[in-house]
Image (tube, helix red, strand yellow):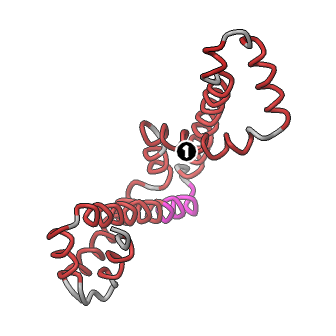
Amino acid sequence: MILADWIVLGLIVVFMAIGAIVGFGKGLQFFTSGIFGFIIGIVVCVMLGTVFLDVAFVRDLLDMLSSYWAHIDFLNAIHLDIIIYYVALFIIVQIIRALAVWLLKSVFESNVGVVKFFNKLLGAILFLILGVLIMLLVVKVIGLVGGETYDGLYDNLRGSALKLDALLEYFNANK
């Protein structure tokens, strides 16, 4: 094993320890509030919005809504009905997200022994996943920087027991 393997394993242990200390409930609340919650809301709206846009009920509702300003070309050009649809969907998604996070946090932050154990376990798993995603993002950014930075890192990762050199190549195959 090379030094990079030990560093990655150390980072994994650190992320899992932080997750176990913080717990799933508080970690979930932190990562789904603020800017993260806003981004999650947008992603969910984009995925769900296009699906529900083809539903007959929604299409009829949007057609009825757009009939109110049918004589105003500018509002038809910007598709105000679609904008209203996505804003309303975003508000609904944010309310559901906030309620779901509040409910999960309330359940996982209870003082029951078994629940405390699962709170710590799922917290460690959540932070492990987030830590791995951060490390993969760093690998991708180094690949995008390229040049001597990429080449030097690749040379240092060669022979890794965790196959970090192969991971670097895989995430930056089309650079």
Question: Of residues 150 and 128, which is closer to you in this image?
Answer: 150
Farthest residue, direction top: 71
The quarter of the displayed image where residue 44 is located: top right
Q: Residue 70, percent across and down? A: 74, 13
Residue at 52%, 49% (x, y): give it.
Answer: 109
Q: Quadrant of the N terminus?
A: bottom left
Q: Quadrant of the C terminus?
A: bottom left
Q: Amino acid at mark 1?
A: Val
The quarter of the displayed image where residue 57 is located: top right
Q: Which residues are magenta?
A: 112-122
Left or right, residue 88 beside residue 37: right
**SS class, disc 1:** helix
* Image vertical order of residue 158 relative to residue 91, above or below: below
Q: Residue 49, percent across and down? A: 67, 40
In reply to whether residue 145 is colored magenta, the answer given is no
Residue at 29%, 81% (x, y): give it.
Answer: 165
Does the magenta stretch mainly form a helix, a strand or a loop? helix
Q: Residues within 10 Å of mark 1 (few under 14, many from 20)?
A: few
* Image vertical order of residue 101 relative to residue 69, above or below: below
The quarter of the displayed image where residue 5 is located: bottom left
Residue at 52%, 44% (x, y): give it.
Answer: 40
* Image vertical order of residue 140 relative to residue 101, above or below: below
Q: Residue 145, percent across and down? A: 23, 61
Residue at 68%, 23% (x, y): give it.
Answer: 81
Left or right, residue 10 beside residue 21: left
Question: Of residues 74 and 114, which is closer to you in this image?
Answer: 74
Q: Where does label 1 land, which residue?
A: 43
